[in-house]
Image (tube, rainbow, N blue to C red):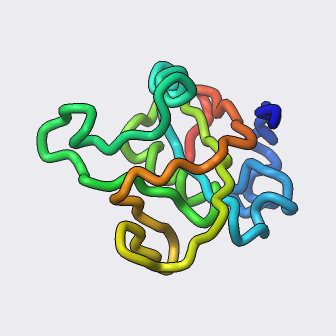
């Protein structure tokens, strides 16, 4: 499957789109979730898959990989940490999202503890000058 780069909608349209960066077909698909990262980390994800912060050796890192149910949630999360840097929102697709051992399903996100790797289907580069308030 090809990974599609989706254009950033631009600041004027973001409020109208409810701060979502992907087409409605992806945003409304229950098996498509979103993960936000920095560009260098995106390249590593493409090479080695998604890893927990703990696996990456980050102190006090989560033992899970989290995926948001809406791209706006992923965007808000990363913009809280990296206010003036380019970030990437990744759209991924899972085969199933049924809660089971190793997967915790919450209202706005899921956490993967068992290393399950979704398929990356697209991404959107959010420019460093876009402020998410």
Residue, x 87% and y 61% (percent of image)?
25
Question: Is 98 located above or below residue 117 in the figure?
Answer: below
Q: Which quarter of the picture shows residue 27?
A: bottom right
| Residue 20 visible in this rendered orientation of the protein | yes
Give the percent coordinates (x, y) of residue 47.
52, 22
Give the percent coordinates (x, y) of residue 15.
74, 58
User: Taking 122 as reference, is 100 left or right?
Assistant: left
Is 55 or 24 nearer to us in this picture? 55
Quadrant including the N terminus? top right
Residue, x 71% and y 56% (percent of image)?
20
Residue, x 49% and y 68% (percent of image)?
109
Q: Which quarter of the picture shows residue 66?
A: bottom left
Residue, x 85% and y 61% (percent of image)?
24
Q: Residue furthest left?
A: 59
User: Taking 26 as reference, is 62 left or right?
Assistant: left
| Residue 86 visible in this rendered orientation of the protein | no
């Amino acid at each position: 499957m090809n990974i599609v780069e989706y254009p950033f909608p631009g600041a004027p349209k973001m409020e109208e789109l409810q701060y979502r960066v992907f087409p409605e077909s992806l945003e409304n698909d229950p098996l498509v979730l979103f993960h936000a990262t920095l560009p260098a980390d995106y390249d590593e994800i493409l090479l080695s898959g998604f890893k927990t912060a703990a696996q990456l050796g980050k102190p006090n890192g989560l033992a899970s990989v989290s995926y948001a149910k809406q791209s706006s949630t992923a965007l808000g999360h990363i913009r809280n940490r990296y206010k003036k840097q380019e970030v990437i929102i990744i759209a991924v697709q899972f085969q199933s999202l049924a809660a089971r051992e190793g997967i915790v399903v919450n209202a706005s996100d899921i956490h993967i503890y068992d290393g399950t790797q979704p398929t990356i289907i697209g991404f959107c580069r959010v420019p460093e000058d876009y402020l998410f308030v």
